[in-house]
Amino acid sequence: MTSNGIHEVIQRTITGIFLLICIFGSYVHSKALYISLLGIILTLILFFEWHKLVAHKGILHRFISFAYPIMPITILIWFAHTYYVSDYYLPLYPLIIAWAADTGGYIVGKLIGYHKMCPTISPGKSWEGLVGSFIAVFVANIWLMPRITHITPFGIENNIIVLNALSLSMTLVAFCGGFLLSYLKRKNNLKDVGNLLPGHGGLMDRFDSVFFVAYATGALLLFTHFCY
């Protein structure tokens, strides 16, 4: 790895730790502080980053803005408002799963990511990185599922087949979130959406996969609610 690559990894690690402290620290402190922080993140994205990706006019802009990023952050806020007391770890599930996928994919991709998936759109993503994402998500699910009571289809915490299927599904969902942002950035000739998070880029660069996993978690909750 070159000196620039090492510097990037160090910068990314320091920024990532700081972001984790802010997000999870606010959650541990109180529901109100965590929800307020999500609201601030959405405001910063809409005012300083979103216009770089989507033309700021027309019905299409309003629809895309509502579906991504407004609705996913609204879902995260609803999770916290509804389950903070009754199912403490559930509101954190989209964040932990998405960032586990990102971290696993980044580490494995940096080390052995020789086979690129879509170099013209997202040159950093590799098949080896996707496997790393899956392993990280699988480990996260092993730890999380016994601690979440509202997502238990098919006795998922005790069924290795279903646990693998869930982990693979969430890995692909997280990948799609990152892929969509990569497409929007390439379309607008951007490397990063912003520079608020050194080593990561902007907030959209860090929350792209979280937004998709938030949708998937909401769908899984609805499935569990209506079928069990």
Image: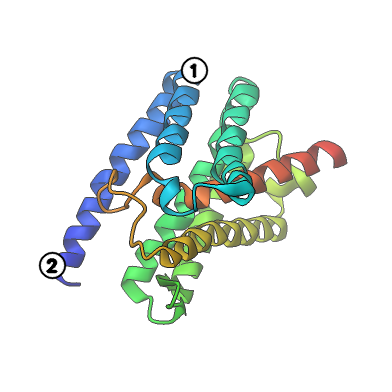
Q: Classify residue 145 by image quadrant.
A: top right
Residue 204, x across and y down, in percent: 43, 48
Q: Residue at x 50, y 69 (%)?
A: 131
Label at residue 117: none
Residue 98 visible in rendering: no
- As drawn, the residue found furthest toward the front would be 58
Is 138 displayed left or right of 10 in the figure? right
Q: Classify residue 9 by image quadrant.
A: bottom left
Can you say whether 172 is above or below 212 in the image?
A: below
Can you say whether 90 is above or below 197 in the image?
A: above
Q: Nearer the viewer, residue 185 or 174?
A: 185
Q: How many marks?
A: 2
Q: Earlier in the sequence, mark 1 or mark 2?
A: 2
Residue 175, x across and y down, in percent: 53, 61
Cα–Cα gap, marks 1 and 2: 42 Å
Disc 2 marks a residue whose amino acid type is Ser
Is 60 displayed left or right of 17 in the figure? right
Would you call the spot at circle 2 few (<14 residues within 10 Å), some (14-19), or many (20 or more)? few
Would you call the spot at circle 1 few (<14 residues within 10 Å), some (14-19), or many (20 or more)? few
Residue 155, x across and y down, in percent: 76, 46
Can you say whether 179 is above or below 211 in the image?
A: below
Residue 1, x across and y down, in percent: 20, 72
- Residue occupied by mark 2: 3
Is 89 displayed left or right of 218 in the figure? left
Q: In terms of secondary structure, where does tag 1 sit? A: helix
- As drawn, the residue found furthest toward the left would be 3
Disc 1 marks a residue whose amino acid type is Ala
- Residue occupied by mark 1: 32
Q: Nearer the viewer, residue 132 or 52?
A: 52
Residue 185 visible in rendering: yes
Q: Residue at x 55, y 43 (%)?
A: 94
- As drawn, the residue found furthest toward the right would be 227
